[in-house]
Image (tube, rainbow, N blue to C red):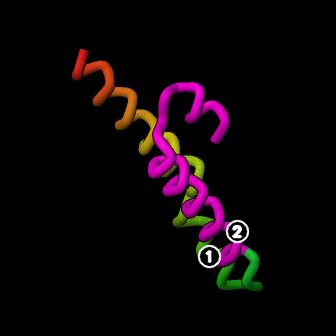
Amino acid sequence: MLRARKCGAGKLLVARMLANVLFDTVLGSVPVLGSVFDVYYKSNNRNIRLLRGHLSRQVAER
């Protein structure tokens, strides 16, 4: 999250990234179902995609 802010990500984007991590943490903590959920829901990968999309839009605007 700190790296995203340093790269110019706005508060809304950081909030979405935090929501991904929170969602992953809460549902991943459920026994058995959480393990299955963790296989399919990768919050870090989603956050990287969000940040890359943000950075590519910044580059396109310049």
Q: Where is residue 18 shown, x and y percent of the image?
A: 60, 56
| Magenta range | 1-28
Is 33 placed left or right of 10 in the picture?
A: right
Residue drawn 66% across and 36% down?
2
61 versus 43 height, above or below: above
Is 12 placed left or right of 24 in the picture?
A: left
Q: Is residue 42 magenta?
A: no
Question: Between 35 and 16, which is closer to the camera in this rendering?
Answer: 16
17 versus 51 height, above or below: below
Rate crowding at label 2 as few (under 14), some (14 to 19) or many (20 or more) other CA atoms within 10 Å.
Answer: some
Question: Between 20 and 42, which is closer to the camera in this rendering?
Answer: 20
Residue named by callout 1 = 36
The residue most toward the left is 61
| Mark with earlier residue (2, 1) | 2
The residue most toward the top is 62
Q: Where is residue 53 shown, x and y percent of the image?
A: 35, 37
Residue drawn 50% across and 40% down?
48
Is 37 placed left or right of 60 in the picture?
A: right
Q: Where is residue 5 shown, x and y percent of the image?
A: 57, 34
Dividing the picture into quarters, in which one does residue 43 lie?
Answer: bottom right
Q: Give the dominant element type of the magenta stretch: helix, strand or loop.
A: helix
> Circle 1 sits in a helix, a strand or a loop, which is it?
helix
Residue 25 circle label: 2
Q: Where is residue 58 shown, x and y percent of the image?
A: 32, 25
Residue drawn 60% across and 70% down?
23
Question: Between 31 and 62, which is closer to the camera in this rendering?
Answer: 62
Residue type at mark 2 is: Thr
Q: Report the mark closest to the observer, 2 or 1.
A: 2
